[in-house]
Amino acid sequence: MTARMDQMSARLRRGIVLGVQEDACQIIGAGGVSSVGYARMFPSPRTERVSPGHLVAVTTMPDGPEVVVWRWYDAVVLAEETGGFRMWEPAHGEVIARPRRGDLPCRPGSRAYLSGGLPGADWWVAGAVAGRAEEAEVELDEVERFYTENDLWNSLE
């Protein structure tokens, strides 16, 4: 692992999306409200993939600007299923998501963070939706590992 990748992954932080444009989104996190761009490989159209209420992972580029590298959906728990939870999210409808932790307290009607794209399952459910980004219990370490193992840190530029 290069020193540059160590520096970038150590700066991964959470933000809750407040507004979305194609080239940037407004988030609120520990540093207050800010406007951040998207990593180059973040798929378009972004206004259809990111919405207010989503939780995002943000990193600082070597040349200074912050960019979104990952997002979690704000989803509703519909039911517990064998090996997972049936979730509903506006852009994807109903999906079955595996829990990140075995003791995940998801009750029907509650809201939890939902993500796709990490190895091991089509969909993952992380912790309950939080009122503050820094309190969200999501798999930041898994996102960092995914970026590192797939050499994606260098493709952010």
Image (tube, rainbow, N blue to C red):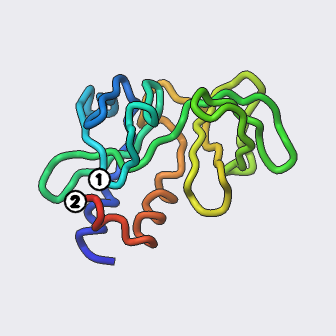
In terms of depth relative to the viewer, which is nearer, 76 or 38? 38
Q: Position of residue 101 (x, y in %)?
A: 68, 50
Q: Along the horizontal axis of the image, is 36 left or right of 96? A: left
62 with respect to 96 (left or right): left
Element under disc 1: loop
Tell me what residue is drawn at x 30 percent, y 67 percent.
6
CA distance for labels 1 and 2: 7 Å
Residue lying farthest left?
A: 63
Please give the residue where the numbered disc 1 appears in the rendered image. Answer: 40
Where is residue 51 drawn, in percent x and y?
Answer: 44, 28
Q: Residue at x 40, y 47 (%)?
A: 43
Name the disc covering residue 157, or none.
2
Which amino acid, by three-letter code, is at mark 1?
Arg
**Residue 11's disc number:** none
Question: What amino acid type is highlighted by mark number 2?
Answer: Glu
Q: Residue shown at 47%/52% (left/top)? A: 140
